[in-house]
Amino acid sequence: MSGFLFVVPPLTGHINPAVGVAARLSARGHRVAWVCADPALVRRLAGPDAVVTGCAGPVPGAGGAVRPPDLRGAEALRFLWEWYLLPLADAMAPGVGAAVAEVRPDVVVADQQAFAGALVAERLGLPWATSATTSAEFSGAYDGLPKVADWIRERLAGLRARIGDPSGTADPRYSPHLLLVFSTPELIGPQAPLAPHVHYVGPSLTGRPAAPGFPWEWLDRGRAKVLVTLGTANADAGGRFLAECLGALRERADRVQAVIADPGGTLRATAGDKDVLILPSVPQLPLLARMDAVVCHAGHNTVCEALWHGVPLVVAPIRDDQPVVAGQVVDSGAGVRVRFGRSTAARLGEALDTVLHDSAHRAAAARVRTAFRAAGGARTAAAHLERMAAESR
């Protein structure tokens, strides 16, 4: 049997897709270990028995830098790299090296934003695969932004000089050996790169720990059901948007019932409310199986999980890769886009009515669902990693 070391950033949306893959490998008898700046987060998502090596690295808000909630576009991207991704890689590198020495893996599986995994593996001569938990960079994310692309290349070259092999040439975001993309061209679009080492495996949705209790009996079979969520990292920016969503949903309470995830506690929940259920967290995967539409921030995981269930979307991207993912949703026909910072209850209501009642959006979501399910998800990703490990011996 082979050994695999998963190197992940301390971000839920980047760990979750790897959880199902790791579970498949473990079930087939392989040795699986993790390295992360937040071991407790990995154990919460992958299970308490996960073998996790901690490393001295920052968690969101690295170095005390708090990203302004209204930061957008190229400036938001620069902030993400300069104040989070690059410091995280520098801080994780020693721990990744120590984990490699301890675990002695046959393959390092590095998340595309955990640069230390790829660069340390390259320096030590180990084969490494990329776990691409967002497909934004495969659909022209930097088209028209040559200065941004050049700036990123310069920063990665400096990072390689510090923690990797200075003579190496591979971009740590894209393994030249095996690139696992948790999406498919049906969503990414015609820009999706084709190469023998690039494999579109679709969403990895298995291996999640059981969610806390949810009042399933509250759901009304006689009304359309809508989930509103802005993910796990946008509580600081979502108050106004969630309030406008709430207004739109209240106006449609005769025909729509909604669940709103509000981790920041910005909305006031009312006991006994039969129209809108406001909770700090929700069991998203099983809930999506009962939803008719989703309103979200165009986070890659949320979009893919919704489309896995054939649920059309209203997307309101906030920052980072979300505008690109929102573009994928619109171009595929599986949803409509609204402006996060300027959407009113009226505009959100119009968008929601569109995805609920326009059969074209539901048909497009169904097409993506079919492609996702055919891709194989965690099972296919694990099989590719097994072959990689066997060929590396």
Image (tube, rainbow, N blue to C red):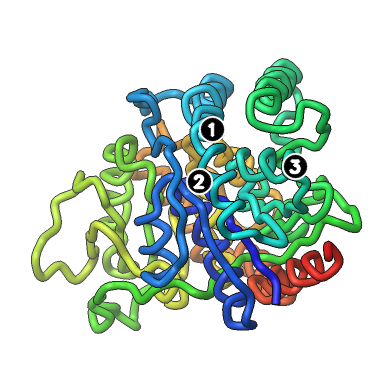
Q: CA distance from mark 1 to mark 2?
A: 9 Å
Mark carried by residue 9 = 2
First in sequence, mark 1 or 3: give its number: 1
First in sequence, mark 1 or 2: give its number: 2
Q: CA distance from mark 1 to mark 3?
A: 18 Å
Q: CA distance from mark 3 to mark 2?
A: 18 Å
Mark carried by residue 85 = 1
- Residue at the far left in the pictured view: 271
Amino acid at dot 3: Glu
Q: Residue at x 30, y 46 (%)?
A: 242
- Residue that label 3 marks: 122
Could you say whether the residue bearing mark 1 is in a helix, strand or loop? Answer: helix
Which quarter of the figure has residue 203?
bottom right
Count residues near mark 1 (Cα–Cα under 10 Å), then give few for <14, some for 14-19, many for 20+: many
**Circle 1/circle 2 CB separation < 8 Å:** yes
Q: In x, y percent, where is residue 279?
A: 23, 60
